[in-house]
């Protein structure tokens, strides 16, 4: 009986361990296998922090809820890029859809807050309204000034924008950037501006192999002339100089210190987070979807832009935020800590599995001995 009891205990532990590994894999590493994740059933998506592949899964428009309360003591941060009357790019949102989003948010009792309110909420647990929403725009496109800003003023919606400091006023490419004069005008009209790096919004080689590219700010880069990778010291010095330069430019042009950074492509590393802290950057933002809680300095953002956006379903997703935008209950775990937890759990499951096989074999042998006797 003792052998059987041990086997049953090991079976229970093995099941719990495998389930825990599955949950952590879906929550932390689903972006590594998007095709597989897309095919998973709905309950799997409820566990994940990144729902970009199935953002409107199973949603249907519902009636307006002018007094609805969907979440409390949490903030949804929405992310936009280009807003244009006639979108020509997948990441562009039409002005009609953007205005419809604003109308539906107001009609469904969502409340816009400023970055300053968000900062006090995250750092000092200051209260925020029910259904709080922070609107953010990346890259500093001129369309923010020409198309989004008039609608924000019309609806009384505050917003924040993240600037690539070296690109301000750049007219090249499909998305010309706003000028400093336009940015200052928007700042006087209630738009807050923060860092999206000085000049690190790009991908760089991560090895001698062509096509092996990673986000410039988040990873050491391959130095082609030297024929080697950057050292950790060189990497930290490079990103420190870039972010410090961005802070200095923003301070000089806008007259206020920078305390927030949106990571290009949402990519970051533990050394990068430490550099941000050293430079007085108190808040950072990824592109993972989720609800933001007090103390969560590295925040989540829900992509609300793009040609495929459906304003009505966007609002339904926000209404169901507590179910569909999973709260990460480990906001203080660094990337290294998460890897250590995942690896430790994997090793534990393997050891339990080996013991389970061993005791299962012994149990089978005992039964066979009983039958033969």
Image (cartoon, helix red, strand yellow):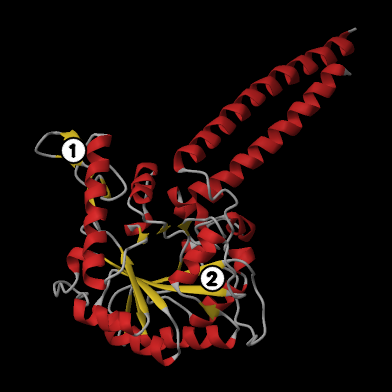
Nearer-the-camera pick, 155 or 189:
189
Image location of residue 115, percent across then percent down: 44, 70
Examine the rendering and report whether any part of residue 179 can be seen.
Answer: no
Image location of residue 193, percent across then percent down: 32, 71
Which mark sits nearer the N-terminus, 2 or 1? Answer: 2
Q: Residues within 10 Å of mark 1 (few under 14, many from 20)?
A: some
Picture residue at 23% right of the left edge, 82% below the top? 182
Nearer-the-camera pick, 50 or 268:
268
Location of mark 1 (residue): 208
Q: Residues within 10 Å of mark 2 (few under 14, many from 20)?
A: some
Image location of residue 152, percent across then percent down: 40, 86
Q: Residue furthest left?
A: 225
Image location of residue 307, percent across then percent down: 37, 77
Does residue 102 lie above or below 8 as drawn? below
Nearer-the-camera pick, 237 or 334:
237
Location of mark 2 (residue): 56
* Horizontal arrangement in the rendering, residue 259 relative to residue 298 (left or right): left
Picture residue at 45% right of the left edge, 88% below the top? 156
In which image quadrant can residue 271 be found? Answer: top left
Q: Residue 285: which numbered mark, if any?
A: none
Examine the rendering and report whether any part of residue 193 can be seen.
Answer: yes
Q: Secondary structure at mark 1?
A: loop
Q: CA distance from mark 2 to mark 1?
A: 40 Å
């Amino acid at each position: 009986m003792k052998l059987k009891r041990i086997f049953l205990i090991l079976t229970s532990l093995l099941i719990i361990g495998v389930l825990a590994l599955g949950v952590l894999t879906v929550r932390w590493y689903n972006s590594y296998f998007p095709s597989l994740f897309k095919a998973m059933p709905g309950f799997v998506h409820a566990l994940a922090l990144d729902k970009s592949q199935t953002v409107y899964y199973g949603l249907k428009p519902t009636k307006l809820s002018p007094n609805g309360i969907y979440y409390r003591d949490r903030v949804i941060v929405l992310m936009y890029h280009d807003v244009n009357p006639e979108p020509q790019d997948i990441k562009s949102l039409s002005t009609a859809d953007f205005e419809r989003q604003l109308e539906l948010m107001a009609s469904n009792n969502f409340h816009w807050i400023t970055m300053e309110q968000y900062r006090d909420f995250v750092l000092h647990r200051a209260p925020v309204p029910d259904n709080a929403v922070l609107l953010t725009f990346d890259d500093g496109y001129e369309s923010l000034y020409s198309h989004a800003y008039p609608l924000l003023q019309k609806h009384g919606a505050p917003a924040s924008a993240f600037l690539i400091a070296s690109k301000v006023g750049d007219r090249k490419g499909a998305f010309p950037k706003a000028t400093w004069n336009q940015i200052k005008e928007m700042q006087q009209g209630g738009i807050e501006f923060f860092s999206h790096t000085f000049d690190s919004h790009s991908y760089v080689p991560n090895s001698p192999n062509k096509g092996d590219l990673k986000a410039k700010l988040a990873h050491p880069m391959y130095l082609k002339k030297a024929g080697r990778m950057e050292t950790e010291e060189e990497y930290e010095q490079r990103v420190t100089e870039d972010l410090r330069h961005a802070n200095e430019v923003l301070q000089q042009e806008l007259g206020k210190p920078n305390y927030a950074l949106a990571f290009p492509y949402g990519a970051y590393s533990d050394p990068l987070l430490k550099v941000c802290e050293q430079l007085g950057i108190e808040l950072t933002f990824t592109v993972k979807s989720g609800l933001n809680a007090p103390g969560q300095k590295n925040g989540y953002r829900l992509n609300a832009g793009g040609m495929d956006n459906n304003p009505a379903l966007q609002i339904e997703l926000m209404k169901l935020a507590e179910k569909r935008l999973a709260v990460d209950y480990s906001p203080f775990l660094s990337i290294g800590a998460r890897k250590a937890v995942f690896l430790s759990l994997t090793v534990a499951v393997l050891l339990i599995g080996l013991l389970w096989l061993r005791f299962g074999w012994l149990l089978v042998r005992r039964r066979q001995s009983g039958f033969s006797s």
